[in-house]
Each structure stands twice: as structure tokens, then as C-alpha cells.
Amino acid sequence: MSQALRDDPAAAGEGRVAAQPRTGMGLLFRAWLPILLFGLLALVPLLAKLGAEGFIISLLTRVVILGLAAMALDLLIGFGGLVSFGHAAFIGIGAYSVGILSSHGQEDLLVQLAVAAAVSVAFALASGAIALRTHGVYFIMITLAFGQMLFFLATSLAAYGGDDGLTLSGRSTLAGRPLLKGDVTLYYLSLAVLLLAYLLCRRLVASRFGRVLRGARENEIRMEAIGFEPFPYRLVAYAVAGALAGIAGVLLANQSEFVSPAVMSWQRSGDLIFMVVLGGLGTLHGAIIGSAAFLLIEEVLSHFTEHWRIIFGPLLILAVLFIRGGLVGRLGRGL
Amino acid sequence: MSATLLMIQALNGLQFGLILFLIAAGLTLVFGVMDFINLAHGVQYMVGAYLTAAFAAWTGSFLYGLVLALPTALAFGLVLEVLIFRHLYDRDHLDQVLATFGVIIFLNEAVRLIWGAAPLSVPMPEALSGSIALPGGISYPVFRLVIIGAGIGVAALLYLLVNHTRIGMLIRAGATNAPMVSALGVNIRLLFTIVFGFGAMLAGFAGAMVSPILSVEPGMGDNVLILAFVVIVIGGIGSVRGAFLAALLIGLVDTLGRLLAPTLLRMLLDPAAASQTGRAIAPMLIYILMAAVLFVRPAGLFPAKR
Amino acid sequence: MSGPILQLERLGKNYGALRVTDDVSLAIEPGELHAIIGPNGAGKTTLVHQISGLARTDSGRILFEGQDVTRTRMPERVRLGLARSFQITSVLPGFTALENVALAVQARSGSSFRFFTPASRDPALNRPARELLDRFGLGARADVPASLLSYGEKRQLELAIALATDPKLLILDEPLAGTSHDESRAVVEILRGLKGRISILLIEHDMEAVFSLADRVSVLVYGRLIATGTPAAIRSDAQVRAAYLGEEEVVA
């Protein structure tokens, strides 16, 4: 476990990240993939005007919002090597920020975003300070436990719906005006937030900070031997990822106009990990593709049977056993 | 609140803790010996409960149901090991987490498909259905005492097995240094399979024992799984002794916390606020306990690896 | 300053009942190149782990420039100027050669809590890193991922990384192991160039290199230092010959 990792620093963390494509076309595709992806996301709503607009917009909005949370998680897993199994808790913090604030009359989106981000950062710093002192399996289980702690807190908030959750009286307002009322507006707002977060994360992983984070994933001992203490960098990354997922939670609450403990269930945390791995670790945009693929699979399967999970579970197992490097790695190599 | 209630809740906490121990024991050995994180351990508990329900309905007796359910749960665990888990031992923790998560999703849904989403109930065996008077004027359900007895019995058996048999020695050695055991020429694959099957059967046994007192329903293993994680993280991965003490601690803190938190808070807050805050805090207590233990000892109380 | 740069005072470490470092006392002077030799299993790597802070010390003290660092964590020791290389090569496999060195430069040059400027185009990191790579003859391989470098190149990169932390004392754990004849000559030349400018503690099996480079040599056998002296004195020490050199007959 962590002991083995310490004894053989060179063995740690290799071979997890999407394989680099060798062909020229593959490289070209890779460079253009994020642009293609965001271009598609920006244009699809226009096509949706041809039919089933409400359904498509609603699905896309969820793709974008969960893509944001998954991308934040990729920052931890793909770049930091930190398998957090409690990421949905931050979505919950964001969603409940909207639910609790609006039930007390505070419906302003900016205030809700600020509160969600601040509480997420605070929770990340407190729980991360303990979880990040451990390694490997311990870290996975501790983050899972902290996520569950918030889940049970939410279920016991009788004043805010407890188990059943609470329905919002409406979407958040901006400057006192109900600007998010339209589904298309909410979609483009979410997409803009995602794009902004994507650009931010891109810079982050390329920065001095990002280098330390990636270095510590590849070989912790090496980092210590050149003078870096990985802990504070990991803690900051954990807080950044938490804040982004918190923001996703604010958007999600607005999308469904409903808040319940289910948004922060541990299965949701598992779903997010699956999205990141499915799309391709350590790519950022892969997480968004993973979110789209995940929700599409869910949508298609549930169309056939209400017991769609009985197909989904084995699909997940097969994906783990056979798709290495994720969809982004596959696409890059396929071309 | 009376002393009687406190005593009853303490016994309930003990019973809950012992059930957690049955689940955590297998989990901690599987982690310790194989460095394999198996989220699907919780569904073994669910499968144990469902099998007991099914066999009890078929034979009309809880006891026969239990006797039939145990080997079936064992066989089921071994089938999963051969089909899926075996291919994951060499993978990293991330792959293990995801694939076993897939197993949970599948089995929870399969159970729902076969038996429906509504909870099943398993009839309590006649002879064990009453209550018994304990010293101190407490009346306590016999069946829960049976669970306590069975839990303590299994714990004692495990203690003997791990500390006084050859296979136990190999398991302990494996938890400390698996490559060394392998280098000694021990068939480590076989050892893995035995440990795994044994752990699966213990979890199934836990599920079988609680089936008459809890509702048997899809997903019942999920929460228990996370509690078992908390137990082994506190106890120290790979340590059966740590799991035993941590399981009792968690069982007691969780059960008594729900009773005492509102009462204690009443000293600070007005009754309405105290009961509301108390009910919100109580389910968080064990996680706070875990955080406190880890803050002082990041590797748990009895770390097996050094 | 005048005192020794590194002083070990009755250093000890046990693995269970096994005493792997037994009462080791040693002083290394500023600018000195001090070699430690000893048969396999003598506890040389454990001693390096203790001095660098990777392994805990059970008894005794480690003084670096007069400051007690026995309980100081490894990153802090590196910042004080105590760097090491690893016997088992441990460069970052997914980073290019240049990035590996630049990261070490980054560790000593300002805060790494900088979030928005791309590090790969930072001349303050890349210029010193390139200079070091050129010095090791790796200039042409700067943009190759470290995992694709040859074994010898990785060994040289390992050295470049350790030097990039700007150490006052450099501990090298078998830098020549597994390198080709040409590569090892190049490394020896680099060490000769460093000699006098920084202090070096060299663990090495290549006796020719040790006796041509070292100012003083210490001999470690079963965790104990049995002799310390000039290369000439060590070569003629009867106890050393009996314990070690006689067996291998490689004295140049």
C-alpha cells in the first residue's frame, strides 16, 4: 500500500493518465478536441429548436453542470493522484446553499455562489487537513466517510425538508431580476461558468503550483527530496476542487429547482469518479466528455427498462477492465 | 431519561457494534492481506439477508434458512472473486473502487428485480421471539441477546484462528508483508481466495442474523459498508483486534449518541433547539470520532503495517 | 564558518532486533569530498536515508552546519542545503528531463503558490535547468520524457536534479551504478569539477572512482564505521583489507 509506494518511488502513479497519441492526426485532434467540445456545446441548443427542445436543454444543462464537478474531481484524481470518494458532498453544499438561503429570502445568485464557495472551501480545508495526512485506501475511505457525514446532516435538517428535500420557490435572481427563468439562459450561464472554470484549471495545472501537484502524484518521495512538502499543495487543490463542485451544486439546484440529500449521496460521488475515468484521467475536458457519455448512457438505458442499472453496473465493470486511458485516449489513438 | 433506557440502548449499541465487527473483520483482512479495496463487501451482507429470507420462506424456518444461506453466501462470494475481483488485485485502487462500485449497482438492482423494491420481513424463530428479564429490572429481546452471543462467539473464534493456527499466522504475516509470504513459497492466490471467501461468509452471516429484526431491502448493505470503513480506518487496516474494538466503539457511540445528544444539549440550549440540534449532530458523531482518532493517529489505533 | 558542515554523533537505527546503524560518528568538513565504502548490506543506504531525513533516526544526533536536524523533515533539510540522489533512480517519469530539473530549481526560487503563469515558459526556471542539463550532456534530450531516457541518462538526470536544489552538501548514493564506462567517466569529471565548491558525501562501489576523487574515505561494515582516513591510509589499513578490500581485489 502506501508502504510499497514509499519503498519504490519510481513505481508510483505511472500509466494512469491517457496515453499520448503518436500520430500527427491524433495530436491535431487532441489539440482541437476542447475547442470542438465547447463549440458543440454552444451550438447544440440551436439545433434542438428542431424538436424536443426542453428535453435536450435539460439534459445538456446537467451534462455541463456535472461536467464541471467531474472536471474539478479530475484536478484531484488525474493531476493530484488523490482518489476522493466524497466529491458529491460539495455539490450538496452548493445545492443546500441555494435551498437554505432562498428559504430565508436570499435569492441572489452571486450571494449564493459566494456562500457555496466559501462553505465548500471551509469544509475542504477541515476534512482535507485530516484526510490528506493519510494515503491510498485510507484516503478513499476517509473522504467517503466525510461525504456521508454531510449526507446524514442533510437528512436530519428537518427544517429544510430532511430526507424528502425541499422544492425551491423559483430560480435564483441576478440584481433582483429573474434572469435565470429561461432554461436556455440557465444553460448558457452554466456553459459560461464551465468554460471559465476550464480555462482556470488549464492554467492551474500548467502553473508552478500545478507542477508541484503533478510531481507529487508521480513520486512523493522525489518531491520531498527536492524540498517540497506536498501536503499544503494538495490541500489547496482539494479546496479549489471543492469550491468548483460547490458552484456546480448551486447551478444544479437552479436547474432542478429542487434540493435533496440525494444530490450528495455516495453513489453520486462514485458516478463522478466514473465520469472522470470514462472520459480520460488528467485531461480536464475528458471529464466533460465523461459526464456527457454517462448521462447519455443513463438516458438511453432507462428508456428501455426501469431496471437500467442492471445493465449499467456490468458496463461499468467492463469499462474498468477494458477501456484504459478513457474515451479521450481512445479517440486520440483511433484517429 | 431512565437508567433502564440507557442500559437497553447500551445493549443495542453492543449488538450493533458486533454486527459491524462481523462485516469489518472480513473487510479489514481483505485490505490487509490483498491491498484490495472492495466496496462490494456490503452487498455480501445484503445477499446474506436476502438468502436467509428466501430460504426461510421456502423451509418455513429461520434456522434452516440460516443454515442454507451461509454456504450459499460463501459460494456467491467465491463466484464473484473468480469472475471479477481476481482480475483487480493487480490494478490500482481507483480501478478497484470503480469496478466494485459497478458490482454494487448491479446487485442492488438485481435484488430489486427479483424480490421487488419493498422490504421483506423474516419471521423471528418462535423460541427466540420473546423478551427476557435481565438483572436490574430490564426486559430485553432474546433474539438480540442471541446476536450479541453469536458476535462474541465469532470474535473469539476469529481470535483463535488468527492467533493460533497456521493459516492465521500466514494471514497475519500477509497483512504485514505480503511479498515476503509469497517469497516463502506459500500459494498466495489460494490464501487470498480463502480469506476472501471467509470474509464474504462473515458478512453474509451478519446479514442473516439481522434479517428478522431489520427490514431486508435493496441497498441495505451500502450504509453498513461505509460504517465498516469507518470501523477499520479507526481500528487500523489489517488488524482484527482494532476492528473489534473500533466496531464496539462505533456501535455504542452511534446508538447512545442519538439518545444522549439531545439530552446533553438541553443543558446549553432550550429544549426545542436542543432536540433539533441533537438530532442533527447525532448521526455525525461517529464521523467526528473518526476524524479525531485520525488526527492523533493517521494510521488508526492498531496499524498492522509498520 | 569553521566547524564541520555535517556532523554525525553516535547515530543509531534498528530494524527490529537488527542494528543497521551502530553508533556512527563522523564529521565532514566544508568543501570535502568524503566517500563511504563498505560491502553490500553494510547499511550505507540506510545511513543516507537517515542523514537525508527519509528514515527516522533512533538514537544520536545529526548536525548540519551546527544545527540539530535529527528530527527535521526531509523537505526542510533540502531547503537548508542538504540534498541527495537515490540509488534506485527516481526521476519523475511523466516529466521531461527539463521539467524534472526545472521543478528542483523551482523548489528553491520563490513561492510555488503561483497559479496562473505557465511554468513551462518561465525563463527563471528553464535557464538554470538547461545549463545543468548541458553540463551533464543531456542538453539535446531536454524535451524527452524521463521515462524514455536510457538508464545512464536517468542516472545523470538524477544528479542534475540534486544539484539543481543548490546544495551545500550533496549526498550521492551510488551515482555510478549501472552506467556505461563513458557515462561514468563523465560523471567522475563532473564530481571533480564540483569538488571544493560544495561538500560531497559519496557512497560508491567503484573503487577506482572513490580513490581518485575522495579527500577522505570511511569504511562501514555491519552498520559500524571501522576506519576513516585518507585514501592512502585506508588502502593500507590492515583491518579494512581484512574486512573488505581483500575480498574484492579491485584496489587501483
Image (cartoon, coloured by chain):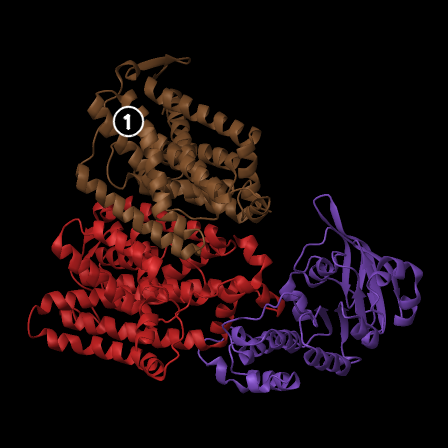
Question: What residue is drawn where x is 78% and y is 75%?
Answer: C209
Whole-percent x, y for residue A220 in the image: 55, 63
Q: Quadrant of residue B23?
A: top left
Q: Quadrant of residue B280?
A: top left
Q: Nearer the viewer, residue B20 or C93?
A: C93
Chain purple in the figure, letter: C
- The quarter of the image holding the N terminus of chain B is top left
What hue does chain B carry in this figure? brown
What hue does chain A carry in this figure? red
Whole-percent x, y for residue B27 in the image: 43, 41
Q: Quadrant of residue B131?
A: top left
Q: Residues within 10 Å of mark 1 (few under 14, many from 20)?
A: few
Q: Which residue is mark 1?
A: B213
Whole-percent x, y for residue B106 in the image: 26, 47
Q: Amino acid at mark 1?
A: Ile
Question: What residue is drawn where x is 25% and y is 62%?
Answer: A294
> On screen, B134 above or below A70?
above
Badge 1: chain ID: B
Q: In the structure shown, which secondary structural element does the residue marked by tag 1 occupy?
A: loop
Number of marks in the rendered image: 1
Question: What residue is drawn where x is 22% and y is 43%?
Answer: B110
Question: What residue is drawn where x is 60% and y is 47%?
Answer: B306
